[in-house]
Image (cartoon, grey):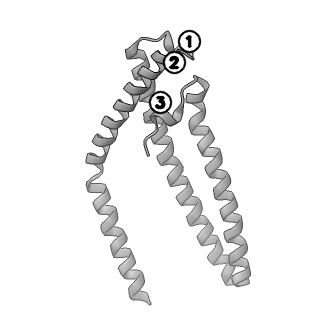
Amino acid sequence: MVWLVEIGLVLLLVGGGWSYLTRGKRSVNRDSLTMRRVDAYIETIRRERKNMELVAMSDSELRDLLHSGAHNLRAASERKSWMLLGAGGVTLFSGIVAASQDGMRGFAIVLAVGAIVAYGLNEFLNRRMREPMERRGIDVDRIRIE
């Protein structure tokens, strides 16, 4: 049984190392895709003319605004992922402690509470990362890259 954990840890380290080594290539691809989305959204803003504040901006101002907004959205998304991973780790550790004291019932209760907390944290952080752009009338889904 211990050897399964060791194999899992080795695979986790190899996968993490590979992701770290190839992140520069992903970043370049993501930036070019972001710029294409920003340019397409600028054309849509000019064509639809719904938000006069955005229509009144020059192309360079609008490009800077949308590109920085997309960058901030990506940074907030990464922060959200790390926070949810931390919440999951705390939940698992707390579940193990509860299981040592109260058995499976305690473990299940802690996991249920942790799942509810993680869901609430996810919803809160999603709203918080979208709010600055939506306040300006920018459709976040048009420039978001998964």
| Residue 1 left/right relative to 108 | left
Comparing labels 3 and 1, the label whose residue is closer to the camera: 1
Q: How many badges with numbers are in the image?
A: 3
Residue 42 vertical placement versus 9 (above, below): above
Secondary-structure class at tag 1: helix
Comparing labels 2 and 3, the label whose residue is closer to the camera: 2
Q: Which residue is mark 2?
A: 48
Question: What x and y, as percent, mark residue 137?
Answer: 58, 23
Q: Amino acid at mark 2?
A: Glu
Label 1 packing within 10 angstroms: few (<14), some (14-19), many (20+): few
At x 34%, y 37%, the residue is 33
19 or 86, which lies in front?
Answer: 19
Label 2 packing within 10 angstroms: few (<14), some (14-19), many (20+): few
50 or 87, which lies in front?
Answer: 50
Residue 16 vertical placement versus 58 (above, below): below
Give the farthest residue toward the bottom. 1
Label 3 packing within 10 angstroms: few (<14), some (14-19), many (20+): many
Question: What x and y, as percent, mark residue 37?
Answer: 39, 32
- Real-space Cα separation, disc 2 to disc 3, in angstroms: 20 Å
Q: Which residue is mark 1?
A: 52
- Real-space Cα separation, disc 3 to disc 1, in angstroms: 18 Å
Whichever of callouts 3 and 1 sits on the residue coming sooner in the sequence is 1
Q: Quadrant of residue 7?
A: bottom left
Q: Which residue is mark 3?
A: 69
Question: What x and y, as percent, mark residue 2?
Answer: 42, 88
